[in-house]
Structure formats: C-alpha cells, structure tokens
Amino acid sequence: MEKIAGQSILNSLETQFEAFEKGLNGQSQSAAHAVRKEAFTSLMNSGFPGPKSEEYKFTNFTKAVEKNFELNAANADFGLSNTQVSGTQIQGLDAHKIVFLNGVYSSDLSDNIQVEGLKVESLAEGFKSNSALSQENFGTKAKFAEDAFVALNTAFSQHGVTIEIADKAVIEKPIVLYFIGDSSKAELSYHIRNIVVAGKFSQATIIEKFDTVGEHKSFTTSVNEISVSESAHLRFFKIENDTEQAYHISNIHASQGANSNFKVFTFSLNGAMIRNNLNVKLQAEGIETYMNGLYLLDGKTHVDNHTVADHMMPNCYSNELYKGIMDGSSKGVFNGKIFVRPDAQKTNAFQSNKNILISDRATVNTKPQLEIWADDVSCSHGCTTGQLDMDALFYLRARGIPRDKALAILLKAFANDVLETVENEAIKEYLAAIIETRLEK
C-alpha cells in the first residue's frame, strides 16, 4: 500500500480532532460539525500533497510542516504586552478593529461595532447560536475535497469572524482583522475561518493581517469564504509581514453577482513560507474583478501565489497584476489561471506577472495559464523575469546618487504600479513605509 503523504502530521491530527470534538459539547450535533467531520475524513483518506503534486510542485508545504512542527501540544497562554500588541497594528488607520489572540477572539481589544447595516460576530458565537449566516455559508465556497489544507482548516474551524453587510449599506471605515500570535514560549498553530457576505449595492473594505511575536515557529491557516452580491463593491486586503519563523497558508474563495466589483490586494513582505490561494468565480454578467499582488522577499522567505479567475458568464472583466522583488536566497512562485467558460462570450481578461531578481541566489517560478472555451473574447497573459535596467541605474549614478539609493529608487518605481492601486491613504502609507525601509537597507 502506498504511503500517504504527511502521515506523521495525520497521526498527530487524529488525536487533536478527538479532543476537539469532546470540547464542542452540544455543537457536535450541528450541521457545521457534520461538515467538519466530512473534511477530516477526506483529509485522513487522501493525505497532504506530496512532492509529485502538481499544485504544490514548487512549494512542498507538507515537508515543511513535518520538519518544523509537532502539532500535538496546546498553545501556550497569550502573554504579550499591550505595547507589543499595539505594535502590530496599522498606525493612522481609522477602522473598525477586530482582534484575535492566538486565534481566539478578544472582546477586550476589539471594537464594539454598532454601525447600521453591518453585523459582525465571532465565528465561535455564530456556531454556538446556530446562526443562519455561519451555518448556511460554512464550506460552500472553499471545497475541502480540492485541497488538503482547506480540509485541515475546515476540520478544525471554530474561530474567526462572520461579517454581513446589508443591502445598500455603505460602510465608510475599513473593517480590520488583526490576528496576533505569541510564540515566545513554544511553537504556535491555529486555524481561522472567516465568512463575508456583502449585500446588494453595498460597499465595504476588509483587511486581514497576521502577526506573530516570539522566536518560536508558527503555523497558521486562514480560509475566507466571500459572497459579493449584485452591484456590491468590496475591497479585500491580505497583508503578510510576519516573522522569519512563520508558516502561513491563505485561501480566499469568492463568488460575484451581477455588476459587482471586487478588488483583492495581496502583500507578502516577510515570513518563512507562505502560500496564497485566491479563487474568484464570476457567476453573472457585468462583473469586474481586480487581483493585485506584491511580494518583496529577502533571506530564505518562500512565497507562492496561486490565483484563479473563473469567467462563467458573458460581458465580464478581470485584470490581474502581480509583481515580485526577490533578494538573498528567497524564492517566489506564481501560478495564475484564467478560465473562460463556453457561456462567457465577450469576456475581457488580462493577467501580468513581473519579477526582478536582485540576488544571484534568488529564484522565481512563474506559470501564467489561459484556458478559453469561448470565441468572442479579448484575453492576454504574460510574465517577465529579469534584473534592474542597468542604463537607468547608470543614469541615476551619473547624477551623484549613491548606488544603494539608486537601486532603491528603481525598485520603488517597479513596486509602485501595485501600490498605486490602493485607494485608502493610511494603508498605502503603511505599506509604502515598510517597502521603503526594506529597499533602502
């Protein structure tokens, strides 16, 4: 019998799942837990992706987890100071704040949000009260049978948040989700599940940010299931600027209704190993989808972006721009897929991935894909990988600018195409400051 990939992880998880079930009490009979059990059974039968898995060909996350984590010990108590907690937050951002400590919702640090048209609830409370939003949307978009790490997250889903934006509601301030971990005493691992439903003609911005404080390793997974209803406008930010000991897998699965507008921003700035899966289904006519990403890597950081824009109906538009700057021994991976289904006539879909390698030791693997089953479409995709323009560098140095400063100027200009798509000035300034500090080292 062929050995299942990640068997040592599965052995640890079996004990964990038994303990997890015992702690659910009455919730163990809920519809949500039935989904959890199905996901866990699927995971135990299929295992984790092995080295021959096409989807994880350049990112062996299974091996990384086996090598670096025991996954059989409870997380240590959260012990960070208020100063350490506040240091993880975006300064100058006027937002509705929701805080999780070691994966658990903190009512003390979170805002008491009382805004007309906005309902925010911790997922744990939603499961406990058997709320319609959590029960009806849990597991509907992120399919556990299609990815082992989605199955892992689904099986252990208990913490996260549900966000419901009413029809025609315009939420002026961003909703920011801070996930703060304490790995100062031992390794840390937890799983987050968020459910977002943006009603018809609504408008909102959501930010998800993970931070870990401490010298031990951390392993986190997050799954976002997002519904963007008819004519809704939703902005979603994923900011990853964690420690060099942080391993993180993100899954964003979204569906869009007619004439909706969805913009997703993914900024990967630091960590040990990061995998970002972004899957958007354009399910009606008149949809606009924007997928923008920037990965700025150094040291041994490994970041893998896998994206899917699935055009299912006619008269829709998608535009994707991902840029990468790699230094040290870092590694970047980009795999972008555009599907144009037979009914998706008059589709306009564009994809671009551009990379700059600063170091001879840095590498990138990029694979744009375009699959079209319709004939009346306008689509393009492409990728470039290279070094900085030496003529431009010479031009700057000839005007008395030191080499390091000249390099930083050129790299900031390269990254600016993505940064300029950020509409919120506080978020843009926060990201620009991080990028500038990194590039001017």
Image: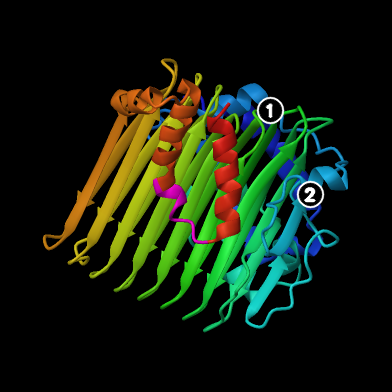
- Mark 1 residue element: loop
Quadrant including the C terminus:
top right
Residue sitting at x 58%, y 51%: 429
x, y percent for residue 27:
75, 63
CA neighbours of label 1 inside 10 A, class few (<14), some (14 to 19), many (20+): some
- Residue 311 can be seen in this image: no
- Mark 2 residue element: helix
Tag in front: 1 or 2: 2
x, y percent for residue 199:
51, 78
Q: Amino acid type of disc 1?
A: Phe
Q: Is residue 267 left or right of residue 182?
A: left
CA neighbours of label 2 inside 10 A, class few (<14), some (14 to 19), many (20+): few
- Residue 397 can be seen in this image: yes
* Count of numbered marks: 2
Among numbered discs 1 and 2, the one appearing first in the sequence: 1
In the foreground, 166 or 394? 394
In the foreground, 200 or 313? 200
Q: Amino acid type of disc 2?
A: Ser
x, y percent for residue 358:
43, 23
Report which residue position mark 2 lands on.
Answer: 86
In the foreground, 414 or 407? 407
Question: Was residue 422 drawn as part of the magenta stretch in this picture?
Answer: yes
Residue sitting at x 52%, y 49%: 251
Distance Cα–Cα, label 1 vs label 2: 28 Å
Report which residue position mark 1 lands on.
Answer: 69
* Region of the chain picked out in magenta, as a range: 417-423
Question: Was residue 62 drawn as part of the magenta stretch in this picture?
Answer: no
Q: In this view, does 247 lie to the left or right of 201?
A: right
Which residue is the extreme one toward the left?
375
